[in-house]
Image: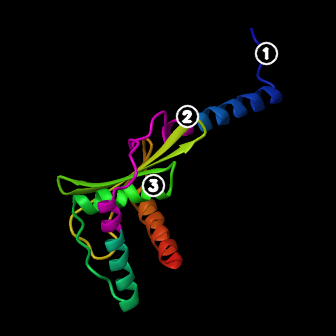
Amino acid sequence: MSAPPTRGHRWHLALALIVGGVLALALLLTSSEPAVPDSRHATAEQVAAARALVNQARQSRAMGEPVELTLAEAELAATSAMVTQGFAPNRFDARVEDGVLTLTGSRPMLFRWINIRAQASGASEGLPTFTVKIGALPLPDWFSQWGLALIQRRMAAQG
């Protein structure tokens, strides 16, 4: 028969469980590959399209009222290329497929990648309702909305 676990053994077991949990969470939140493929530099047409979007956003701020933006595939591709180029080695992709807006970002972290995907569909006033997934872990809706609203406020404050 073995002796009952001592106080020291319990600490070792608790530490092993904590380390195992942190490791499992890290593997759920990261991937070995980026979700967004490597892209080339933005073309002159993409730069012009992105500049036009920025000017529309500036117009909205100057008027103090929202301006409706209609983004086609060309504008989404331009935005993706410019964000990826401006924030390398991070990668960004925006696209609409089957009526679903999908925003995907990949960021290197040590020897892994953090991939974040946000999806929204349907019409909305202001910030749409997104479902967000980090790696293989979907975030609760309330947490996603809180985080996206926080990002929107930071971006607005930075101009």
Residue 103 x/y as whole percent = 35, 55
Which one is earlier in the sequence, the residue at label 1 or at label 3? 1
Task: Report the residue that reaches farthest toward the left.
Answer: 98
* Closer mark to the observer between disc 1 and disc 2: 2
- Amino acid at pointer 3: Gln
The one of 16 and 66 positioned closer to us in this rendering: 66
Residue at the disc numbered 1: 3
Task: Report the residue that reaches farthest toward the front.
Answer: 44
Residue 45 x/y as whole percent = 29, 61
Which one is earlier in the sequence, the residue at label 2 or at label 3? 2
- The relative height of residue 132 versus residue 113 in the rendered view (above or below) is below
Q: Quadrant of residue 129?
A: bottom left
For the residues labelled 1 and 3, the Cα–Cα distance comes to 62 Å
Magenta residues? 24-50
Residue at the disc numbered 2: 24
Callout 3 secondary element: helix
Report the residue at 45% width, 35% height from top: 33
The one of 80 and 98 positioned closer to us in this rendering: 80
For the residues labelled 2 and 3, the Cα–Cα distance comes to 32 Å
Report the residue at 50% width, 56% height from top: 87
Q: Is residue 128 magenta?
A: no
For the residues labelled 1 and 2, the Cα–Cα distance comes to 31 Å
- The relative height of residue 131 versus residue 61 in the rendered view (above or below) is above
Q: Is residue 2 left or right of residue 34?
A: right
Give the class, few, some or many, for how many residues have Cα within 10 Å of label 3's Cα (few <14, many ≥20): some
Give the class, few, some or many, for how many residues have Cα within 10 Å of label 2's Cα (few <14, many ≥20): few
- Label drawn at residue 85: 3
